[in-house]
Each structure stands twice: as C-alpha cells, then as structure tokens.
Amino acid sequence: MNPFTRFLFELQGVTDLFVRVVRGLTKKPRYFDEIIRQLDLIGVGSAGIVILTGFFTGGVLILQAYPTLQYYGAQSNAGQGVATSLIRELGPVLSALMVAGRVGSAISAELGSMVVSQQIEAMRALGTSPARKLVTPRLVALIIALPLLTVAADLFGLIGGGLVANLVYGLDTTVYVTSVRVGVSINDLLGGIFKPVVFGFIIGIVSCHKGLSTTGGTVGVGRSTTSAVVVSSVWVIIVDFFLSKILQQFFTGTMF
Amino acid sequence: MTPESSYNLNGNSTPAIEFRDVYLAFDDQVILEGVNFSVKRGETKLVLGGSGTGKSTVIKLILGLLRPDAGSVIVDGEDLSDFDDEDLRRIRKKIGMVFQEGALFDSLSVYENVAYRLTEEKVPADEIEHEVRRMLQFVDLEDAIDKMPAELSGGMRRRVGIARALVGNPSIVLFDEPTAGLDPPTARTICELAIKLRDLEEVSSIFVTHEMNNLEYLSSEYAIVDNNGNVHFEEDGEFLCMLNTGALMLKDGEIIFDGSDRALLAADDPYIRRFIRGK
Ligand SMILES: Nc1ncnc2c1ncn2[C@@H]1O[C@H](COP(=O)(O)OP(=O)(O)OP(=O)(O)O)[C@@H](O)[C@H]1O
Ligand SMILES: [Mg+2]
C-alpha cells in the first residue's frame, strides 16, 4: 500500500472513531468515574514533568536572550520576551510533546495489549462500547488536562525566567514582573489556552486509534506505541503552525 | 412471534441461532464457504473441527464481532446483517461468551471481572455481590475472589471467564474450547455445567471442543433435579430422546457433518473417523 492510501485509511479510522465517540456522548451510560480516574492519571501524573520542562525552558530563554537584549539596551523587556514566546508557543507545544510521550504511549500500549489479549472483543461481547468506555474518558481527560498543564508550564516558565534574570543577570524582579504584565495580551492568553485543547484532542484520538487498531501480537503493541507518539507529535507541530497563523489573523481581524 | 412458539423447545419455533449461506474470507484466505446450520432453542451444538478451520470465527459471527462477507447470521429470529452498534449491544446482552483464551480484563480483579456486566447495567451493589459469589461458587473459585487475573493459573482464568459469561443468565451461551488444557475433573465440571444449563435452564449453546470425552458427556448424560433440589446426572438409556445435543463438524470452510452424536460416531467419512479416533 502506498503511503498516501495508507494515510487515507488512517484518516478514515480516526474519523470513524471520532464519530463513535461523539455519538456515544449523547447516550447512556456515561463513564464519569472513568473520566475522573483518567484526569488523575493524565493530568496529575504529568504535572511534574510538564512543570519541570516549563521551568527550565523559561530559564534557558532568558539565559540566551538576555545578552542580546542588553546589547540593545532593552533588558527591561526581558519579561515580555519570555512571556510571549512561552505563552504563545513553547508552553503549549512543549507540554503537548511531553504529554504525547508520556500519555500517548501509555494509552496506545494499554489499548493495544487489550486488543491482542482479546479484552476489547470481550468487552464488546459483554455489550460495552470500547469507544465509549475507553476512548471518550481518555479524550475528555486530555482535552481538559492539557490546557491546565500548559498554564502550569507557562507559570513555572515565567518563574524560571525571573529567577535566571535575577540570579544570573541581576535584573530587578519588579522590572521583570511589570514587563511580563505589560507584554502579555489577553489574545495571547486565549490563544495559549485554545491550542492545547486542540493538541489534547489530537494526542487522544491518535493514540486511541493506534492502540485499538493494533494487529500482530505483542510486537504490534510496540509498533503502535511508537507510531502513536511519533504521529501525534508530528501532528502537534504541524497543526501548531496553522493554528498560530489562524489565531494571528483572527485576533488582528484580517483574514488573508 | 406467538407466545406459544417462544416456549416450544423442540418443535418448529425460530431457532436460537441460524447461519444462512455464510461466506467469510480474511484477505484472500477463505474461512467459511457457504455455511448453513441452526441451533434450536434449548439445544447444545458441539462444534468440532481441526485447528484453524474457523470455529472461533463462527462464534465471533454470532456475536457480531465479525460480519460475514455474504449470507446472514440470525440470532433469536433477528438478522444481524444491518444491525448497528446499538442493536448489536442489545443482542449481545442475551449472549454469554467464554473466550478460548479467557480474555479477562487484567486491570480488574476477579470480582470485578465477574461483576462486569452487572456493574455496566448499574445493578445495585448488594445484588451484584450476591450474584458474583453465587457464580464463583458455581465454578469453585470463591477463594480467588480478590485476586487479580495475573495471579491465577490458566484453568482458573478459564473458570473466571465462564463465571463472567454466565452472570445475568444469558439465554445463549457460546463456549470456545472451555476445557482445553484443564485437568479431567475440572473439564468434567465444565461439561456438567453445560449440561445443567441445557437441561435445567433451557439455555441454547454452542460448545466448541477438540476433546472426545466432552462429546461423550454432553451427548450421553442429562441433569435432573430431585425432590430435595439436588442436581443429579443420569446416563442416558430410554431417555435418549430428551438429550438435546447435536454435533457439527467443519472442514475447509464447509460443514461436513451435522447430526446426532450417534451418527457422528458411526460416520464412514475417513476424515471424521480420524478426527474421532485420533488416527
Ligand atoms: N483477524 C484475523 N485476520 C486474519 N486471519 C484470521 C483472523 N482471525 C482468524 N484468522 C484465520 O482464520 C482461520 C480460522 O481461525 P479460527 O480462530 O476461527 O480457528 P479455530 O477453528 O478456532 O482454530 P483453533 O481450534 O485453533 O482455535 C485461521 O486460519 C486463521 O488464520
Ligand atoms: Mg479457536
């Protein structure tokens, strides 16, 4: 099968799964407990790595940018520099990539091994829809958790940036905070929260689809885990570009 | 359906399961090539056939886990052909399935596995507990109630699978090699279970097996309840006509035998003879 046909088949699979999930939303039973459980696993469980990533990213941004800013005499704008790049781009994208690696792989490995050990078939045989019981809670949890994680990453990034500015370059903290507050617009915040909603959806639907379409025993589980992470990460980065463009035009009010 | 026909066990009522000219192929490997058979209400149909002849596939078709390429699968008078997920779910509620490999949910304990169907249907917790304990007693696994599937032996897992399938009193039960790899007394217990379901609960079932003693038990014994409510197994004699068991053999995508166990044992087809005697 050539790559393009395969891509179309995958797209069909993802769309089909999505339709099942959406249809399932209107019907009972709804698995609220399962959503809470997944929120705990996905959200709380990923908080540590996402915060750590955010913190050091904020730090390194200042570390690298400060000398240049100083050269132009613009060091008082350091806060704005970190804040905009973190909130618009790095916070959402890096959190999404971390979550794709940690959660996407776990989801597709879990669902994949359920497929190869016939647990998915058993579930269907017992009258439960795997889309509703397994996919919806994970998808909903990711869509809720990723924006929250991103906000945490942004916050800790700003703190990291502030610390580095203060401790390494001796920038006054109030100058930094003022610059952050002046530099960040409401549009940046809205965009920075909207993106992770989309990324959460991408990671969830791709990983669930990869997991549920596992074939070929335990080797297949490894294969689908790898491709869940790779495919969702690549899509996050591609979609990020187009989302940035769309958000830019949306907020400035000029379409094309 | 008229009220009387639904309770007529041997007569001309709608069969519990019916295959009409079913074709199925995986890629270019043809598995079923025009399969026709039916399982009457209250009947147990033993399905025999070499490894890879499509026995598990037949069972998956009944549950709608697979769809035939052509032909129709009819369960309880309803043709599954153009059923959507919701209709299939309704049908599946009537069916208990014992998977060949057990297929227990390994993130759930034995208790939760057996309770699964009832939990999904939001049955009150104390009723679930009662039913789960009863089922586990039935398969003699009460002690394992709090264990996880990973802590069980293969045979124990199979029995938990049986308990899980029978919870909720399904009217059709599908056994996929339920005795493979079990010690003879446990295998015997499982056959007794199938006999009890057939004779006392009027369950229709498909029993896939390779083991000839399963065939012997199921086609020569029947269960009766005495005045004290105890279940006894009686060897057949003059009551042979009461035994509601048939056998069916698959080979190369077709049914090469469908009839009573006597006819099977007396068949002159060399393949069947070899299958039965192992040489
Ligand atoms: N998902 C699948 N994709 C491709 N081929 C399959 C699939 N499932 C089953 N088959 C093929 O279908 C044939 C029948 O399989 P099935 O599991 O029904 O056999 P079986 O009669 O139950 O065998 P056994 O006694 O070993 O359990 C086998 O040859 C198998 O290779
Ligand atoms: Mg099989």
Image: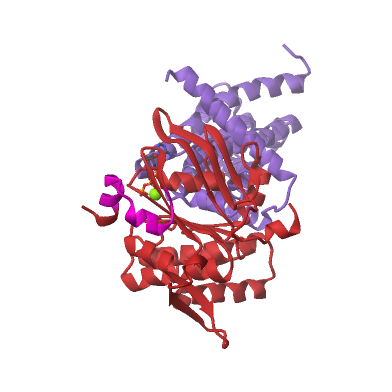
x, y percentage for residue A17? 60, 36
Residue in view at x 75 percent, y 33 percent: A186
> In the rendered image of this protein, does residue A227 appear above or below residue B239?
above
- State which quarter of the image contains the C terminus of chain A: top right
Answer above or below: position of B142 versus A104.
Answer: below
The quarter of the picture showing ligand 1: top left
Q: Image quadrant of residue B133?
A: bottom right
Query: Magenta stretch?
Result: B258-275
Q: Which colour scheme is used?
A: by chain
Does A49 sit above or below residue B191? above
- Magenta span dominant secondary structure: helix
What colour do you see for chain A?
purple
Of B160 and A7, nearer the camera is B160
Looking at the image, which residue sits at the far left? B279
Instruction: Classify residue B15 as left or right of residue B57.
Output: right
**Is residue A58 in sight in this rendering?**
no
